[in-house]
Amino acid sequence: MFDSNPLRLDQFARDERAIEGLPVRLVIAFVVGVATLSVMLSMVSGVDTLSVSELDASPEPDVVTPGDQSVDVTAVDADGDPVAGATVVVKAGTADLDGVATATTGDDGTATLDIDPQLGPNQADGTLEISVKPPSGSDYADRRENTEILVVRD
């Protein structure tokens, strides 16, 4: 049937089953390759330095009444440590605020903002939205929704 000479190409031309095992072999090679790459990356030190830490805002007080007042907002990283040099922005949510209030955090990670929230007629409560802009050149990001300041009527 088949010649024992491995260099004969006409063997492959007559073999109708030659491609049947190819997809399975490719899948196996792919799975083994991905698993090997995963093990190699886990062994490389310093890979976690490529990650970005999420910032959050911690307002004090986090519940206020309508009217002119100051609020301290601390920018914290994923471990709860304060972040200096971040810009804190407070803007209207479901409560009204004339414009936006901005401040930069100091060495202690806290920024003091002067706000004058207002509620609409027959509105019992509302919120002010806080966003944190990370310091330039840092490994921080603010992609998730932050804590809001709750405004309640007396």
Image: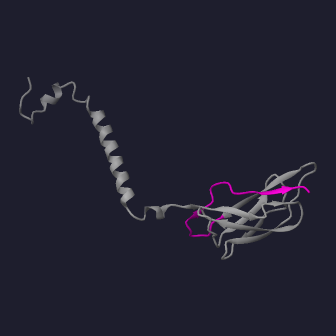
Say if the magenta span includes residue 152: yes
Residue drawn at point x = 62 percent, y = 69 percent: 135
Q: Residue furthest left?
A: 4
Say if the magenta span includes residue 53: no
Is 143 left, or right, of 111 in this rendering? left
Rendered location of residue 29, percent (x, y): 30, 42
Q: Which secondary structure dominates the residues rendered in magenta?
A: loop
Please tell me which residue lies in front, 14 or 81: 81
Image quarter of the C terminus: bottom right
Asked whether residue 104 appears in the rendered view, the answer is no
Number of dots carrying numbers:
0
Q: Quadrant of residue 118?
A: bottom right
The image shows residue 18, relative to residue 67, as above or below, that is above
Q: Quadrant of residue 54?
A: bottom right
Please tell me which residue lies in front, 49 or 11: 49
Rendered location of residue 137, percent (x, y): 56, 70
Please tell me which residue lies in front, 122 or 5: 122
The image shows residue 50, relative to residue 8, as above or below, that is below
Q: Residue furthest bottom?
A: 107
Q: Quadrant of residue 99?
A: bottom right
Residue drawn at point x = 89 percent, y = 50 percent: 124
Image quarter of the N terminus: top left
* Start-end of magenta stretch: 133-154
Rendered location of residue 15, percent (x, y): 18, 26
Residue drawn at point x = 25 percent, y = 30 percent: 19
Is 103 left, or right, of 53 in this rendering? right
Rendered location of residue 55, percent (x, y): 63, 62
Asked whether residue 29 appears in the rendered view, the answer is yes
Q: Residue furthest top?
A: 1
